[in-house]
Amino acid sequence: MSSAASSEAGVSIGAEAGTMRYSYALHFRAGTMPTDSATPLHMIDIIRKKRDGGELGAREIAFVAAGAADASIPEAELAAWLMASWIRGLSLGETRALTMAMRDSGVKFSPAGLGRRTVDKHSSGGVGDKTSFLVAPLAAACGVAVPMISGRALGHTGGTLDKLEAIPGYRTALTLAEFEAVIRKCGASIIGQTDELAPADRKLYALRDRTGTVENPGLICASILSKKLAAGLDGLVLDVKTGSGAFLRRMEDTESLAALMVTTAEAAGTETVALLTDMSQPLGRAAGNWIELVECVELLRGERPAWSEDLRELSLILAGWMIHLGGKAESAKTGYTLAEAALDDGAALAAFMKMIDAQGGDVSIFDNMEGFHKPGATKVVEAWESGFVAEMDTTALGWAVQRTGAGREKAGEPVDPHAGILFHARRGAKVEKGQTFATVFATRPELLAEPVEILRQAVRFSKTLPERVALVGRVFTKDDAEEYLRTALSR
């Protein structure tokens, strides 16, 4: 975005040559966009304006969102607009306008009749990131209503809905009335977007994956928050990934995204907190679909394997914040204690199984989880060197998982519930050459070679123990986020 275009534009977020850049200007507050005239709008004019570095007004943004929702704008034009927005960046005003326009592009869920505060969690995307299956039942077991609207695999990251659909019969497509009924009965429900809920995001979400426009803070923010705000949430906990597996690699970019999402959600009336969490390695042991559910159910049953300790700890921290924002704990720390009690006494497991059953899932498969797992092909990968596991390119590992058949290359493609990768050694572990390092499950034998090769290239061993990386780094509340952006404005 040119300096002329970014002046008076709020926070401008752009990308050139694959490297994110940020510039900050005046008018931090929401609602400072100029009023548009009643002149008829044309998509090609909007594309050109964005392409040339101009800032779109709320009316123009709403026109794009409405056209995406009702298919009146062709996909080619939407794709061109997405690429222009990715290259030029979206200002704070544009990001907020797009978030609200996509939220309002369909009907909205009203949780008023539930009689409890509603809180949800959302992750910016990671590998082996399965905390939803733990935090939703943990918060529900502590008296918080959790209306969770989730997505499918995007880029190198897995999809919550794809994982749940590994359970025979589980329905991710519920009407809003069914959604509310499950929450009333179970305390939580995890579904996908309905036809009526944020339809503009559903269209743009699929196009971003196919046009190479995923890694943009404004588009990420609007996509995540439009779905969440359409659910009428009282509170929202954001898990913003950092490190080699994050969509945004630089810490500056990640912090800016977290601050952007918190201030945008707060401006819409939803109490929000963002935690910056480590994704320098896959979370927990499993990355795939069914195998991730297995790992979560093991934890819900009270098991505590060393390879799942980071998953357990992060889930309790996130659930603690959800319970706090849900009004059931005076602090996130107290919420953590309540969540851990619900994990230890089996209340969270009961809530999870109740939700699965209420949404048509066959809970009996959890009686023999190993027997249900029937991958088409299996390859045990041995450590090719001795030493400490020093570095993992987690994005590359995510693509390795996708290549097994667990993910998709095109929107609408089926995924293999039994494909994925189990890691037998974590970052910092000392291994000997020839020791089992990972087990790769693929749809067919011919799909094994590529993920195995990617895995070998993505992991580095060293003779010295790597420096420890904190599981949770910075935490942004509303005040923290606003202060961050004010400081950025003064640079």
Image (cartoon, grey):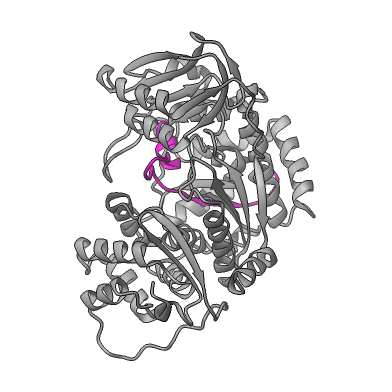
Q: Identify the image quadrant of the N terminus.
A: bottom left
Determine the residue positioned at 35% across, 36% down: 407
The relative height of residue 335 versus residue 14 in the rendered view (above or below) is above
For the record, the magenta segment spans: 142-166
Which quadrant of the structure image shows residue 193? Answer: bottom left
Determine the residue positioned at 57% across, 39% down: 131
The relative height of residue 80 versus residue 453 in the rendered view (above or below) is below
Q: Where is residue 82 in the image (x, y as percent from the top left)?
A: 31, 63
Determine the residue positioned at 50% across, 40% down: 244
Q: Farthest residue toward the top?
A: 434
Q: How many marks?
A: 0
Left or right of 416? Residue 339 is right
Residue 362 in view in this figure: no
Give the prevailing secondary structure in the magenta stretch: loop
Which quadrant of the structure image shows residue 313? Answer: top right
The relative height of residue 433 versus residue 397 in the rendered view (above or below) is above
259, 338: nearer the viewer: 259
Determine the residue positioned at 32% across, 30% down: 403
Left or right of 224? Residue 203 is left
Q: Position of residue 373 (x, y in %)?
A: 42, 19
Q: Where is residue 429 in the image (x, y as percent from the top left)?
A: 61, 21
